[in-house]
Image (cartoon, helix red, strand yellow):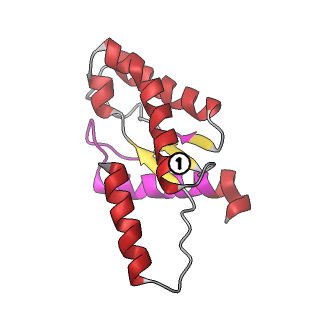
Amino acid sequence: TFQTNLNQYMTQLTKDNPNTQINIKGMFWHQGESDALSSAAQQKAYNQNLSRFIQDVRATTHVNNLPFVIARLSDEQTSMSDAGRTAIQKAQDNVALATPNTISVAMESAQTSGIHFTEKGYDTMAKLLANGFKGYFQNIL
């Protein structure tokens, strides 16, 4: 679904802007709550699933080293077990370390409602992700 939607969007964007070169500069990604609430087997598969997703996004965008910024699950997301949250956080960090042009950004300062971020929390998340991108990928800006 992501690939289909992105391809449709890029086709329409190119059609609407025929004299403009469009470059995708990076990808911000936040996900993992459902995985943290899932079975241990699903949590264990998260590392491979996230790695494969990054590869798929890069293939779909035709940007082999597309900067990828992962918003880690936060310790403040208390509506999931510590073990589940920790398993996903470790996978997010492991993928960031093992995958070129990929970083993970801590979200502990973003306000949550237990599992999801609040409106203020999403504002903080956006700033944290932007700062992480600027700090790590400043050479491509």
Is 64 on the left-hand or right-hand side of 120?
right
Whether residue 96 is situated above or below residue 139 in the rendered picture: above
> Magenta stretch containing residue 124, yes or no?
yes
Whether residue 131 is situated above or below residue 51 in the rendered picture: below
Looking at the image, which is closer to me, 56 or 112?
56
- Residue 114 location (% of width, % of height): 26, 36
Mark 1: few/some/many CA within 10 Å (<14, 14-19, 20+): some
Residue name at image x 47 percent, y 25 percent: 47
Amino acid type for the residue under numbered disc 1: Arg
Whether residue 129 is situated above or below residue 44 in the rendered picture: below
Q: Quadrant of residue 62?
A: bottom right
> Magenta stretch containing residue 113, yes or no?
yes
Looking at the image, which is closer to me, 133 or 14?
14
Q: What is the total number of numbered labels drawn onto the structure image? A: 1
- Residue 133 location (% of width, % of height): 60, 54
Residue name at image x 34 percent, y 50 percent: 2
Is 42 on the left-hand or right-hand side of 14?
left
Residue name at image x 37 percent, y 34 percent: 76
Residue name at image x 34 percent, y 13 percent: 41
Question: In this picture, which residue range is highlighted in magenta?
Answer: 104-133
Under tag 1, what secondary structure? helix
Which quadrant is home to the C terminus? bottom right
Give the residue furthest to the bottom. Answer: 19
Name the residue that disc number 1 marks: 58
